[in-house]
Structure formats: structure tokens, C-alpha cells
Image (cartoon, rainbow, N blue to C red):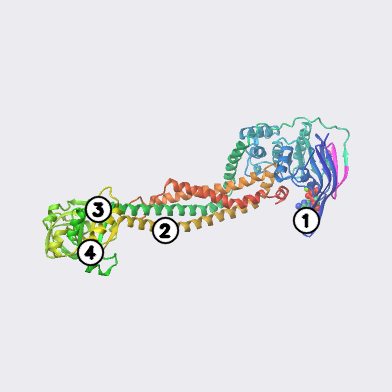
Amino acid sequence: MTALLEIRNVSRTFQAGEETVTALKGIDLTIETGDLVAIVGSSGSGKSTLMNILGCLDQPSGGDYRVAGKSVLGLSPDELAALRREHFGFIFQRYHLLGTLTALENVAMPAIYAGLDPQSRADRARALLERLGLADRMDHRPNQLSGGQQQRVSIARALMNGGEIILADEPTGALDSRSGEVVLEILKELHRAGHTVIIVTHDMQVAANADRIIEIRDGHVLSDRRSAEKGSAPPSSTGKPGGRAGFLDAFRRRLSDAVPMALRSMAAHRVRTFLTMLGIIIGIAAVVSVVGLGEGARRKVLSQINELGASTLSLYPGKGWNDERAAAITTLVARDADALAAQSYVGGVTPFISAITRVRSDRATSNANVNGVGPAFFSVNGMKILKGHGFSADSVSGRRQVALLDDRTAETLFPNGEPALGRTIMIERMPAVVIGIVSRPRSAAGDKTLQVYVPYSSASGRLFGEATSLSGLTVRVADGVDTGFAERAIVSLMTRRHGTKDFFVFNSDQMRKALESTSQTMTLLISSVAVISLVVGGIGVMNIMLVSVTERTREIGLRMAVGARRLDIMLQFLIEAVVICLAGSVVGVGLALGMGLSLGGAESAFPMVISPNSILAACAVAVAIGLTFGFLPARNASRLAPVDALSRE
Ligand code: ADP
Ligand code: MG
């Protein structure tokens, strides 16, 4: 029959700077199932080193060690973790309970890594605590328990995954003698129940409880005595927990275990967590609101263009907006407008003439831009007639002396809320009756010039002279006609009429594109600044996670001792990073939404449009940041060696 634990010629050396310390020198040891063994020796004799090798927390430097006939040499960290989970239960002098967890949660913890479902976990942990006389202490945290109680909690934890072999390193070392006796009594009882128990102690009185005492000095076995035939108990069932789950299930469960764990450790460092989050909050709020502002500006520009009237083309004399000779070109005349209006692809033509002249009422005098326009001008330009009415065809053909004022002009000429409708104003020397008030086109919101509109026939005939050429004309493309086609046709028709192309066409579609690309460029620019702030936030997260790993080295060591795989540790820290980032992004999106609300809706100067998509994208980015910047700290944590991690103060 193979021995349960078999150590052959095992040595262990440590490199302490230049010096090589040999803690174990060629130890041979066999431990059978059901043994109650005490390993004794003075401080520094190598007991803990031996214990760590026995428990697969550490590996020998030389020799061979077999657990249930299986050599541990060359096993991967995860395979060693599996051995610890399946065979060993650890009891430490300093208990190593996790301070943020209750007694029940501390006991249940090893079963997380064994893949037990939460219900069975809680049931088993409760049963174990009851068995150890702690039924009324389940929801206490370690700092609310006495030393003896804490050690009993840690014994329950050692039994959680079965604890076939109990390894207790100075289990009574930190306890008063009464509590120490209780703990020893429990260990003896476990031995009677079939567990193999190995106690490490420097205290001969404690060792006297064992059937077999192995004495160690300077890394050698000095003596190995069995006390008078107590006989080892027959191996019996050590009550391994059942109800293990499939791989996928276990993975999902591990995630759902890790999230509350992450929340708890965040709650334990509230200020720090908040400061870490702040970087993400600011970054996400910046990105979301900048993208929202960009989208809002884009929509605003679009709606302004749409107000100009869909699919309009405007003709102006000259080669472009800045052509100095445009004023000298007088070939664009009213008959051109008539010719265009006759084309099938034209839905309407509005010629216009404009010039700054003096306008006078019996109350006030001011300079205003006087526009000679056609009846369709207001609708083509998306201007609303607020009061009265626009020009009839008759008022154009009859050169009527009528005028429309924009609201600002009405206020200037007729202050103090006097009604303007029906009053007569003087435009230069032409009297005109005000027949309507129009809104200012939104696109001219910033423009303070007063605008007066008269029929273009009256303007050309009575104000500026018959021969005056047009300032321009606006063509509304007939419904269903492509503006590009209409533009080409108009250009060729007008070029034929004038004999040369002495005009240019302004297409509202071009403006749309130009404005859109400008606003996109702006959005891109500001977004990249916001992205930089997100990266800075991510680096903050990484920094804090690295600190957190260092701070929680012992917790990591303990989790590994009870059987956590590297992936488990890695997941735990990654999830913490992701939870921090995700929570930060939720607050950040909230901030951005609040900012959008306070800026006002689409009517405000800075409309912000935050779509559900951009919120989702923000959350996805936050998760990505958490994963990216959490990776390094998480990997560092998962690569710690269990013994080193446990012994770190
Ligand atoms: P015990 O538990 O019997 O008091 P240990 O097994 O802890 O003794 O240590 C045995 C010897 O090995 C001591 O001399 C100690 O200084 C040395 N030692 C233990 N662990 C390390 C380590 N990680 N690095 C260097 N020396 C170590
Ligand atoms: Mg020790």
C-alpha cells in the first residue's frame, strides 16, 4: 500500500542575498492515512519549511515528494493548487482570516474554488461552524471574535473542502492555554473522525497529544517516535462535499462570486476607490458630453440648412463669394429669372435685389438692408410670416408700395410695442405700407442688420432703377428632380444666355456637407483630448490596483493556499478593475446627462444629444479600460508564490 505522504531525501535551500540558507537537509518521512503527527523542534529548525512542502505550498529544492503516490515534482502552479484543494486543510498560527468577510463567508471561501454552488456552500459552512460551537457567531467579522474563536473558524475553513489532511502550523501559538486546549481537543476529534492531522509546534506539551512525534533540528530529523500503541483510526469518510458543477457553470458562478467580492473590497477603501474612479468619471463624462455636443451641433446645422429650404440653388454674379468684380457684373437680370421659371426642373424662382438704404417711420430713422424679393422668397428661405401676409403675385406685377419687416426692424421703427401693421414707412423717397412681419431666418441669428422686404419689381422699378441687375436669385428645384442635374442644366442655360459663365451657383447640399465635415473635425479633435483623459484615468486605475495587490498579498496567498487557481486570482483583480471603471462610467454618463439637461434641449445654443448608443459605447470603453489597465496588476497577483505571499507582512 502506498503511503499517503512520502518524502524522500528532500532538501530545501533559500537564497538570502549572497548567502545560501539550507533549511532542510535530506529529510525522509512517511505519513500514513489516519496518523496524528506532531512535528517539533526549536524555532528556526525548519518545521514551517517542511510543513509548506508537505502542504504543496512550496516545492523541495531536491529529493522527491509524493502525495497519494503522485510525485509533485514538475507540477504546474494550478496542478499544485488542485492538490491543495483536494487533500489539504491549513490552520495557521495567525488564523489568516479575511477581515472583510464574515465567519461564515471565511469558512465557505475554499469551496468557491472547488466549484461548489452558493447554496451548498452556505449550508456546509453553517454545519461546520455549528459543529465547532460557533452557531451564534456566523455573521461576525474576525475582529469581533476572540483568538480561540478565530482559530475555530479557520479549522472550519480547513474542513470546508474535505480537509483529508489537516496541516496546523503552531495552531495554539497565539492562544491562551484554555483556548489552546479547545483547539487541540478539536484536532484530536478530527483525527478520531478519520482525518490525518499534522501539527507543527515548538511546545512539547502540545506534541504530547500526538500518536507520533517527529523531532527536527537544523533541517534534520532527530527522532521519530510512536507513543504507546494508540493505533491509528481506520480511514473513514472525511465528508467531502458533493454537488460540483460543470465547467461553464463554474466559470459563470466564479464571476458572480467575484463581483460581490470586488464591491466589498471597494467598500473597504471608499475614499481611495472614489479617487480612482474620479479619473474614469471625468474621462467618460468628457467623452460622452463632447460626442453629445458634436452630435447636437451637427443636428442643429442640419436643421438650419433644412430651413433654407430643401434642394435650393442660388445664383450670384461673379466667380465666387469674394469676387471683387461681382458688383460690376450686371448681366443677371429679371428676365433670367423668368427664363428659369419656365424650365420643367424648376419649381420656383425668387430673384432678389438688395441694398442698404435709409428707412424712416414717424418714430425713428435707421439704415436697413432693403431686399427686393419675389412672392416665394419667404417659403423658399424657410421664414415664417408672424403677422399679416406675404406678397401676392399682384403686388409684384403691380409694383405695389408694400413692405414686410422682420421683427427686429418692426421694433426699431415702431418702439414700445406700437403696432407696425398698416403703418406707412419711407424707404428713401418711396412710401410703403407695412403688410406683414416675418421672422428672421435662423441662420441669420447673429446678424443684427435690419431687414426690409419689398416686391422686387418695386425695388427695381421705384428704388434702385429699372436696369438694376439682380443681387442674385434662388431656384427651388422641382420635386423629385436631382439637384445635381438641375444645377448642370441651370449652368448651361445661363451660360448660353449670358454668353459666358459670369455667375456662380451655391448649392445648399454643398453647404450641408461643408458644415458637417467641419463639425465632425471638431468632434474628432475634442474627442481625442477626452480619450487622453480616459487613458490617464486608466493609468490611475492600474496604479491603485498595483498598490492593492501589494497590500493584499497575504489575502492572495491564503486564497492560493485553499486552492485558488492563478486564473481565479487574476479574475478577481480584473473584475475589481472592471467594476471600478464601470461604476465610474455610470457616474460619468450621469454627469454628462445632467450637463446636457442643464444646457437645455435642441433649442439652446449648445444642444447636446446623447444617444443610448453612446452610453453603451462609454460602458464598453470603461470595461475595456478596466481589462487593459487591470491586466498587469491582476497578472502580478496571480504569479505570486503562495508561501511568499502568506509569509509577507
Ligand atoms: P521554524 O518554522 O522551525 O521556526 P522555518 O522553517 O521557518 O523554521 O525556517 C528554517 C530556516 O530557514 C531558518 O533559518 C529560516 O531563516 C530559513 N528560512 C525560512 N524561509 C526562508 C526564506 N523564504 N528565505 C530565506 N531563509 C528562509
Ligand atoms: Mg515556523
Image coordinates of residue 44 in percent, x first then y, are 81, 51
- How many badges with numbers are in the image? 4
- For label 1, the SS is strand
The residue pinned by badge 3 equals 476
Q: Which residues are magenta?
A: 208-223
Q: Considering only order in the chain, which callout, 2 or 3, is on the residue closer to the N terminus? A: 3
- For label 4, the SS is loop
> Which amino acid does the dot numbered 2 rest on?
Thr
- The secondary structure that most of the magenta stretch takes on is strand
The residue pinned by badge 2 equals 521
Q: CA distance from mark 2 to mark 4?
A: 41 Å
- For label 3, the SS is strand
Q: CA distance from mark 3 to mark 4?
A: 24 Å
Q: Are marks 3 and 2 in contact (CB under 8 Å)?
A: no
Residue 213 in the magenta stretch? The answer is yes
Residue in the image at 85% along x and 32% along y: 231
> Which amino acid does the dot numbered 1 rest on?
Gln
Does the beta carbon at disc 1 come under 8 Å from ligand 1?
Answer: yes
Q: Considering only order in the chain, which callout, 1 or 4, is on the residue closer to the N terminus? A: 1
Left or right for 56, reference 365: right
Q: Nearer the viewer, mark 4 or mark 1?
A: 4
Image coordinates of residue 614 in percent, x first then y, are 45, 48
Mark 1, Cα crowd under 10 Å, few <14 / some 14-19 / many 20+, is few
The residue pinned by badge 4 equals 499
